[in-house]
């Protein structure tokens, strides 16, 4: 292998005409499972601008509206038409909604990823093709096998950090980066001896959503510790199509911890202008004098 590391993000796939934006997933979900799509629309700040930040958006679950909606099933114990099912109806409504997002939606996401069309090598034109060193190492945040199918990169050179679409048994990891503190639990300030047990159980269901949809970056890094430790010989890092979003910041920090950041040269791609990329690179503590910003075709 060479001393180069490529970091591949969704902008790389989009550059190659693959409809892999989260907005594309939204359209797929609306067509495939409209009921789940409506749940996403009701409880998240979804619009054309926010879909591209879908992972981060998962942390902004409107739990107040969810609990208010489910409260219609919180029947008073003194109701004349009381039924034993009322012991569980409220929790069932909460659990159904949480499951639609944390399980059903993610299952659809994996199915969508696996059906994306990947261009073959012979389909590339000079207006699309980018120069890639096949002997380099690749940290791939995409689930697709574009590097393998389109650029003939050996699979042994690529770490698919969040799963591989071409392997049916591979976990497809998607999630937010907000880890809740214990005091942020909905039950934290409740007197559990006096509170309605249905409310307490419902709060636990909602709390569990945030842990179920959390992207466990630290565990993923630990699982791939040999890869990151092996970056100590890297002299050049090329970021292709990655947004440098906060949810993935732990991976970049781990890379920085394992390289000689005083000498490594960085090349970072941008889509329309480099302002946001520059801000995010600065936030990571990377010295700008070692960084060059380019459009993908300029690499």
Image (cartoon, rainbow, N blue to C red):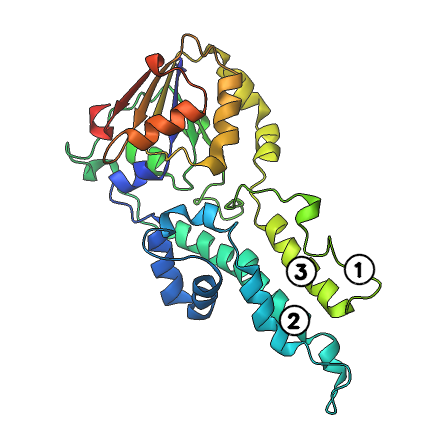
Q: Is residue 135 above or below residue 19?
A: above
| x and y percentages locating residue 135 in the rendered image | 36, 19
Which residue is identified by label 1? 191
Horizontal side of residue 200 vs 260, given as left or right: right
- First in sequence, mark 2 or 1: give its number: 2
- Closer mark to the observer between disc 2 and disc 1: 1
Q: In this view, which residue lies farthest toward the top?
A: 263
Q: Which mark is residue 200?
A: none
Residue named by callout 3: 205
Q: Is residue 259 visible?
A: yes
Q: CA distance from mark 3 to mark 2?
A: 9 Å
Distance CA(mark 2)–CA(mark 1) = 23 Å
Quarter assignment of residue 127? top left
- Quadrant that contains the N terminus: top left
Check disc 1: other Cα within 10 Å, few if <14, some if 14-19, many if 20+.
Answer: few
Q: Which residue is mark 2?
A: 92
Query: Which quadrant of the figure contains the C terminus?
Result: top left
Determine the secondary structure under disc 3: helix
Does 47 sit left or right of 200 as displayed? left
Residue 110 in the figure: left or right of residue 150: right
Question: Please, what secondary structure does the residue beneath circle 2 have?
Answer: helix
**Badge 3: few (under 14), some or many (20 or more) residues near its Cα, within 10 Å?**
many
Picture residue at 29% right of the left edge, 36% below the top: 150
Q: Are marks 2 and 1 in contact (CB under 8 Å)?
A: no
């Amino acid at each position: 292998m060479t001393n180069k590391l490529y970091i591949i993000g969704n902008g790389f796939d989009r550059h190659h005409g693959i409809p892999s934006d989260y907005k594309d997933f939204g359209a797929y979900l609306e067509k495939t499972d409209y009921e789940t799509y409506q749940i996403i629309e009701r409880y998240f700040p979804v619009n054309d601008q926010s879909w591209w930040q879908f992972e981060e958006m998962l942390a902004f679950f409107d739990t107040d509206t969810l609990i208010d909606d489910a409260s219609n099933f919180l029947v008073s114990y003194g109701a004349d038409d009381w039924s034993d099912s009322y012991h569980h109806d409220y929790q069932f409504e909460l659990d159904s909604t949480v499951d639609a997002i944390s399980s059903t939606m993610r299952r659809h996401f994996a199915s969508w990823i696996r059906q994306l069309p990947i261009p073959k090598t012979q389909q590339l034109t000079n207006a699309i093709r980018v120069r890639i060193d096949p002997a380099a190492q690749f940290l791939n945040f995409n689930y697709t096998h574009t590097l393998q199918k389109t650029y003939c990169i050996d699979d042994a050179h690529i770490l698919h950090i969040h799963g591989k679409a071409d392997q049916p048994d591979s976990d497809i990891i998607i999630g937010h980066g907000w880890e809740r503190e214990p005091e942020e639990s909905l039950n934290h300030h409740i007197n559990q001896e006096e509170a309605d047990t249905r409310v307490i159980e419902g709060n636990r269901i909602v709390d569990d959503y945030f842990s179920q949809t959390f992207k466990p970056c630290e565990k993923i890094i630990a699982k791939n510790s040999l890869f990151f430790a092996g970056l100590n010989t890297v002299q050049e890092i090329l970021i292709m199509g990655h947004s440098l979003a906060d949810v993935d910041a732990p991976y970049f920090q781990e890379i920085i911890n394992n390289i000689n950041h005083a000498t490594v040269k960085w090349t970072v791609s941008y889509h329309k202008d480099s302002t946001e990329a520059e801000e995010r690179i600065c936030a990571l503590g990377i010295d700008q004098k070692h960084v060059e910003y380019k459009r993908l075709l300029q690499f």
